[in-house]
Image (cartoon, rainbow, N blue to C red):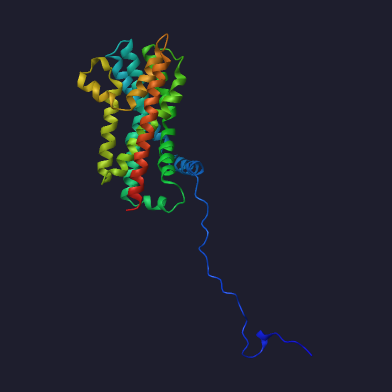
Amino acid sequence: MSVVPAEVLPGGSRTVPETAPGPAELGPRARLWPSLAAVYRAQLSRARVARIPLLFVATFQSIGIAVMMRGVVEGGDEAQSVVAGSSVLVVAYVALNLLSQYFGQLRASGGLDHYATLPVPPAAVVLGAAAAYASFTVPGTLVTAVFGCVLFGLPLTNLWVLLAVIPLAGAALAGLGAACGLLAPRPELATLLGQLGMSAALLLGVLPAGRMPEAIRLARDLLPSTYGVEAYARTFGPDPDWALVLADLGVCAGVGVVSLAVATRAYRRAAVR
C-alpha cells in the first residue's frame, strides 16, 4: 500500500499558511558627517573649474583695496584694520556674494529637487556647499594678508590666526549668504542681497573704525565679519590680548551656528515646495 499526498490528488489543495505581509524595513538613516563629506567632495569637484577665476577676482579685489588705502593710511591701528579687513574681505566675497547667488539659482532652476531626492540630511547640503566655497578662500586670504603686512610693514608672526578666522568667519558669512539665496523669492534678489552684504563687509570691515560716525560703528558691530577682522587685527601688537581674540572668534562661531541653522531651515522649506 502506498501513501499519496493529498495535494497531488484531483481536487486536492495545498495548505499554505497565510501570513500578513509586514512593512518593508527601511535602511538606516544617513549620518550627518559622512553625508557632509560626500556633499563637500561633490561641490568641490563641481566648482573646481571656476576656482582660478574665483581666486583671482577675490584676491585681486582685496589687494587693490589695500593698495588704495595705502595712500590714505600710514600705519598704526588703522593699518592693522585695513590689512585685517582686506584679508577677511576675500571670505566675504565668496561666502556672501557667490553662495547667495548659487543657492538663489539652485532654487529658481529646481536644482533643490535633486538634493531632496538624495538620502542626506538638509544640514549636510548647506554645510557641504558652504565649506566647499569657503575652501577656495584660503589661498586668497593668505596671499592678501602677506601682501598687506609687507605693504604696511606689519609683522607676519601671528599669521597662523587666519587658520581660525577663515573657517569661523566663513561659517557666519556663509550661513547668511545661503539664507539670502534660499529665502529670496527670485534669483535676482538673492544676487542683490549678496552684493549688499559684500559691500557692507567692504565698507565696515576695511575702513578704520576710528574714522566712522557712531551710528556707523553700531552697524559695524552687527556684521559678523567685523569680529573676524578684530580678532586678526589684535594679533599685530607686540603683546596681543588673546582673551579678546578668543572672544571675537567665539562671536563668529556663535553667529555661524545660528546663521547655518537658519539656512538649513530655509533649505527645508524651499525643498518641499
The image quadrant that residue 209 belongs to is top left
Residue 129 image position (x, y, % from top left): 41, 40
Q: Is residue 198 left or right of residue 153?
A: left
The residue at 43%/36% (across/down) is 131
Question: Left or right: 240 with respect to 19?
Answer: left
In front of the other: 246 or 158: 246
The residue nearer to you, when weighing 83 against 160, is 160
Query: Residue 10: x and y, percent?
Result: 64, 91
Q: Is residue 110 above or below residue 163?
A: below
Residue drawn at x 35%, y 32% is 173
Name the residue nearer the viewer: 92 or 49.
Answer: 92
Give the x, y percent position of residue 103.
34, 43
Quadrant (top left, top right, bottom left, bottom right) of the N terminus: bottom right
Q: Is residue 37 above or below residue 92?
A: below
Foreground residue, 171 or 62?
171
Occupied quadrant, residue 250: top left
Residue 57 place in picture, x, y as percent: 35, 31
For the point 28% across and 24% down, which residue is it? 221
Q: Residue furthest right?
A: 1
Q: Residue at x 53, y 68 (%)?
A: 21
21 left or right, relative to 137: right
How many labels, in total?
A: 0
Using the rendered view, name the quadrant where residue 58 is placed: top left
